[in-house]
Image (tube, grey):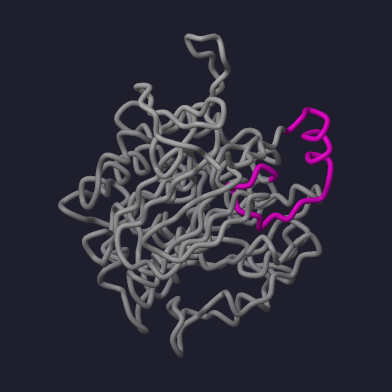
Amino acid sequence: MRKVFTLFLCLLCGGWLLAADIDMQIHWGTKEAQLKSMTTAGKQKKYYTGDYSPENLRALSGNELFGALNTLMGNTCKLLESGYDYNALRYAYVSVDKDLNNSGNIIGYYDGQSMSGAWDGGTTYNREHTWPQSKGADKDTPMGYDMQSVRPANTAINSSRGSKAYGESSNYYDPDEIAINNPTYEAKNLGSYRGDCARVILYDYVVYGEAGGHKNDLYLGNAQLLNKLGKSGIFESVAVLLKWHMLDPSSLTEMVRNDGAQTYQGNRNPFIDYPELAIQMLKDKVTTYQVSVTGAEMWPAYSLTLANGFIAYMGTKTSRPAEVTVTGATSTYDKTSGRLTITNVKGAVSISVASPQALEMTEDGQKAIKTIHNGQIVIIKNGKAYSILGAPIGDIR
């Protein structure tokens, strides 16, 4: 029988993690990141309810999903009320972009630098419009002073972007070319700002744009993503946007500021909370392949992928499967972090986990393990496998 290693996180260990410095760019799927921001799960549960529960949203796609998110994010956004403007952002970042390792500091966009959150007239940091002002996010409109979109960035780093569209080809702006400038950053965690940029663009499009006749009171005609692809626009292509989004999952930095931005202006960025919604919404614009998962939880819970693949985390906050089997693509799996990297997708992707799910007593009083073996649920007793109906399958080695 395959050996299975289950990681249990004790309270003492959890307390140590909370006190220690941690990489703010670490993916949210890691237990370290989730333990560092304990408020997120509660905020998500209260925000995504009723028709907008995660289960109901995942059941939608295309324009229907756009419409649901457009309504939810528009109705909960308070930027049309008095008291919100471009200048107010300067004094709010210290409560939103918090560096959890350094009280009073904020995390800068593009390079992850920890900087003083005190506004000094723009010498240290200024306000970066992820969707540029010249392409629709004018600072006198809500899109131009939206906390979810307008980010604090090191002034020198910000100037290098200008108004270039994001992308990988020549004459596009690629934040992956900027080194993470933070002493707590660990390269093994694969932190990047590619995904951050993609998720902000998706947010802006859904909150301020229109699709299938769906639009809210915040609608701006300049926020039409599909009309702004290419070098003179916002992103190189939908395929590149989703590639960045799926190969760089949400980070601790994003989740902390998603919580803070909700406190500030009422709405959340669902593509940070539930990244799988992005490809479901845009699936008709790209070539996709089905993804199925057996025997374990996976975050993000992708049911579709591009040929480039994705990064996801297997298991729960306290345990990781010892072994993951993937068909239909190239894969690597790190059982310590639970990180599964999928690349070179050729067709439908099947992901299965051969980890015990439960220990139970059989009718003869012997202990048996219910597990996943070769993609099916089996009962293992005395080294032999049986179907859940009791039919012998064979030896497990």
> Measured along the vertical axis of the image, is residue 390 above or below residue 283?
above
The stretch drawn in magenta includes residue 34: no
Position of residue 173 measured from the top left corner of the image (x, y, whole percent): 50, 80
The stretch drawn in magenta includes residue 28: yes
Side of 391 relative to 332 (left or right): left
Q: Residue at x 77, y 34 (%)?
A: 14
Position of residue 334 measured from the top left corner of the image (x, y, whole percent): 62, 55
- What quarter of the picture does the C terminus occupy? top right
Magenta stretch, residue numbers: 9-32
User: Of 136 and 234, which appears nearest the observer?
Assistant: 234
Q: Residue at x 67, y 74 (%)?
A: 155
User: Of 278 and 293, which appears nearest the observer?
Assistant: 293
Q: Residue at x 30, y 58 (%)?
A: 348
> Measured along the vertical axis of the image, is residue 378 above or below residue 141?
above
Side of 55 relative to 381 (left or right): left
Position of residue 110 measured from the top left corner of the image (x, y, whole percent): 61, 69
- What quarter of the picture does the N terminus occupy? top right
Position of residue 107 measured from the top left corner of the image (x, y, whole percent): 69, 58
Q: Residue furthest left?
A: 213
Q: Residue at x 79, y 50 (%)?
A: 101
Image quarter for residue 203? bottom left
> Measured along the vertical axis of the image, is residue 289 above or below residue 67?
below
